[in-house]
Amino acid sequence: MAAGMTAIELLWGQRAAPKRGPQPTLSVARIAAVGVGIADAEGLAAVTMHRVAEQLGVTKMALYRYVPGKVELVALMIDLGLGEPPRLERVPGGWRPKLDLWARRMFDQFRAHPWALEVTVGGRAVGPNELGWLEQATAALTGIGLAGSEILDVAMTLVGHVRMVVQQVAAMGTDTPEQAAHEAMDAVLAGREDQFPALVAALANPAGKDQALDFGLRCILDGVQLLIDQSRPVGRVPSQ
């Protein structure tokens, strides 16, 4: 029975097959996939054990043989939704293109499953896919002159930027959140140009619209390069 199973045990495949009772007819992966489908279509609040069981054609009590509750179900959904991380060792050009690709792929995953934003915070059980994402970023930054704490801080800064942009996209309900925000601000500023001249000028002459992801990534990675340059002994060439 799954009643005593923790999210960690379920995520890492440590659930022993039941020795008594009916043989399993479901899998935690299939259960999580149904949960993800519901959340993608209707939001996380729509995901309940009853709803998942109904879509699987089983009773809620039968579902408890595999997953003890919604907390554990959501943990499984997160790991499935994030998916396997990109294999950055195959990306040429050193740490920077690797992290750029890593962040963009993460953006795609969160964009496809925006409900995951609200449940990937705080202390919680972390699965193999999610940990794999962090491993790939850490490996890309290893050997370039950064301390371990700096490596983790870079990864978390990138995650924070990706999450912020996805939140804006989800909140605006459009793939062009900056344009939507500009249009809303233009409407408010109409007739108030003398009161907010600098803001009006900036909005009138943007370098480009809807580049929040690109701009933030460029600034973060430029900052990492500066940190590397400042910490590198004279004459030393960083490893790629």
Image (cartoon, helix red, strand yellow):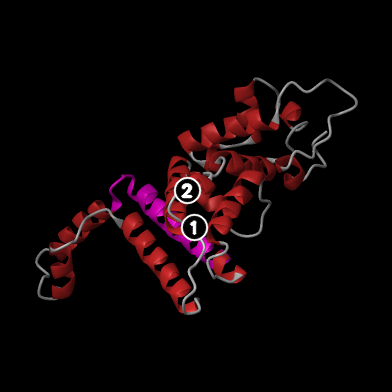
Image quadrant assignment for residue 188 = bottom left
In the rendered structure, the answer to whether residue 59 lies left or right of residue 239 reads right
Q: Is residue 170 magenta?
A: yes
Q: Amino acid at mark 1?
A: Val
- Per the rendered image, the range of residues in magenta is 152-177
Q: In x, y percent, where is residue 151?
A: 56, 66
Along the viewing direction, whichever of 159 and 177 lies nearer the viewer: 159
Q: Amino acid at mark 2?
A: Met
- Mark 2 touches mark 1? (CB < 8 Å): yes
The residue positioned 29% from the left and 51% from the top of the image is: 177
Quickly name the residue at label 2. Answer: 106
The residue positioned 87% from the left and 23% from the top of the image is: 21
Q: In x, y percent, where is residue 29?
A: 65, 32
Quickly name the residue at label 1. Answer: 159
Determine the main secondary structure of the stretch shown in magenta.
Answer: helix
Badge 1 crowding class, 10 Å Cα cut-off, few under 14, some 14 to 19, many 20 or more, is some
